[in-house]
Image (cartoon, rainbow, N blue to C red):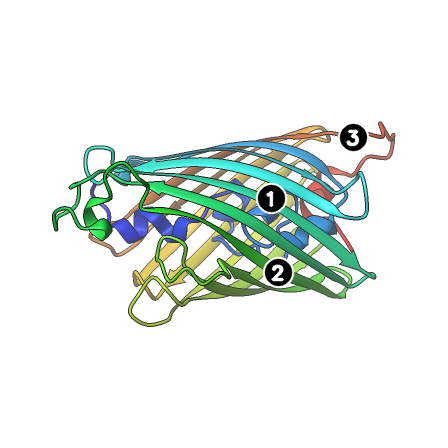
């Protein structure tokens, strides 16, 4: 592959089209299926029953991502979700393949606070002797067994200060695996949303991947047009890879389904990577209510 392993693996994150289009800045405003990957507390912020299929491709790493997810916050006060994702990169080199299975729950506490947690099983396989340093587990993998096979969990909280303004904190891989394959990360975000637009600024600290703690700053905006279309732009800077990465996204949101695309590309890098993410979602209404949420409400929710 023509990019670095750190860029290709990208903390093991699962991309969603909306998050990629907004530069990854969606810890406070990311409801529905994106909450499974970013901040589980947000599942309780919108009354939805969503099914999602996603596919992503990074040509420089020959990376493929395929996933399915479902989130239900309509059947009871306790919101829940499940997701399963398979990813692979560099098939002619280190040939790393991993499976990520998640189950999450979220509970609103009053009108202004939501708490959530995600249990995660991560299994990673890698080609034996595929790395430059021979048959070490770090570079070459392990014969007949995965290089990583553990359970871990995430936990998050989101506060609604005033109507439309949310602040969130979340921790990832809180079992402290001490592995860059499941790095311990702390993130926070502040976002404002309305029926016409959304804006968010996020930051995170990665305590595991590098020899010292490194940070990342993300910012994104979203504009809703004609109550059907979403246009997104974003930017992130990563102190670990020292990369600036702009992004764009488009979405068509019908009352029953949506199709969304997110694209990002690294700048000023000898090993730049590109993400192309496509997401298809189906919005199910188990009550068959005539007053179903508007397309914008499907994405932004509300306390």
Task: Determine which residue is flagged by label 2.
Answer: 156
Residue 285's disc is 3
Residue 21 visible, this orientation: no
Quadrant in the picture for residue 168: bottom right
Q: Quadrant of the C terminus?
A: bottom right
CA distance for labels 2 and 1? 14 Å
User: Earlier along the polypeptide chain: callout 2 or callout 1?
Assistant: 1
Q: In this orientation, which residue lies closer to the viewer: 5 or 248?
A: 5
Tags 2 and 1 in contact by the CB under 8 Å rule? no
Check the image and name the residue furthest to the bottom.
Answer: 212
Q: Residue at x 47, y 60 (%)?
A: 218
User: Earlier along the polypeptide chain: callout 2 or callout 3?
Assistant: 2
> How far across and down, in percent of the image, does residue 254 sit?
69, 30
Q: Residues within 10 Å of mark 2 (few under 14, many from 20)?
A: many
Residue 95 visible, this orientation: yes
Disc 3 is placed on an element classified as loop
Q: In this orientation, which residue lies closer to the viewer: 99 or 206?
A: 99
Tags 2 and 3 in contact by the CB under 8 Å rule? no
The number of discs equals 3
Tags 3 and 1 in contact by the CB under 8 Å rule? no
Q: Residue at x 55, y 56 (%)?
A: 154
Disc 1 is placed on an element classified as strand
Q: Residue at x 78, y 63 (%)?
A: 112
> How far across and down, in percent of the image, does residue 111 sit?
82, 61
Is residue 196 shown left or right of residue 189? right
Q: Nearer the viewer, mark 3 or mark 1?
A: 1
User: Earlier along the polypeptide chain: callout 3 or callout 1?
Assistant: 1
Task: Determine which residue is flagged by label 1.
Answer: 103
């Amino acid at each position: 592959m023509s990019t670095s392993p750190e860029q290709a693996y990208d903390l093991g994150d699962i991309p969603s089209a909306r998050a990629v289009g907004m530069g990854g800045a969606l810890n406070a405003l990311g409801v529905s299926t994106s909450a499974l990957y970013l901040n589980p507390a947000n599942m309780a912020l919108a009354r939805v029953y969503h099914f999602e299929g996603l596919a992503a491709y990074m040509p420089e790493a020959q990376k493929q991502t395929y996933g399915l997810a479902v989130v239900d916050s309509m059947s009871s006060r306790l919101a829940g979700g499940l997701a399963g994702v398979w990813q692979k990169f560099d098939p002619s080199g280190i040939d790393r393949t991993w499976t990520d299975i998640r189950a999450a729950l979220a509970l609103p506490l009053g009108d202004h606070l939501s708490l959530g947690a995600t249990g995660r099983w991560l299994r990673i396989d890698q080609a034996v002797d595929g790395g430059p340093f021979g048959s070490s587990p770090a570079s070459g993998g392990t014969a007949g067994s995965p290089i990583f096979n553990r359970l871990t969990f995430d936990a998050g909280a989101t506060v609604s200060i005033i109507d439309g303004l949310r602040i969130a904190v979340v921790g990832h891989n809180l079992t402290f695996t001490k592995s860059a394959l499941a790095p311990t990360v702390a993130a926070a975000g502040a976002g404002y949303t309305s029926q016409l637009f959304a804006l968010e600024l996020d930051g995170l600290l990665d305590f595991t991947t590098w020899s010292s703690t490194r940070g990342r700053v993300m910012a994104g905006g979203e504009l809703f047009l004609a109550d059907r279309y979403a246009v997104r732009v974003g930017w992130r800077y990563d102190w670990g890879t020292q990369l600036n990465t702009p992004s764009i996204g488009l979405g068509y949101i019908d009352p029953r389904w949506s199709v969304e695309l997110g694209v990002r590309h690294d700048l000023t890098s000898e090993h730049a990577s590109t993400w192309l993410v496509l997401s298809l979602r189906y919005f199910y209404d188990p009550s068959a209510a005539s007053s179903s949420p508007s397309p914008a409400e499907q994405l932004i929710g509300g306390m």
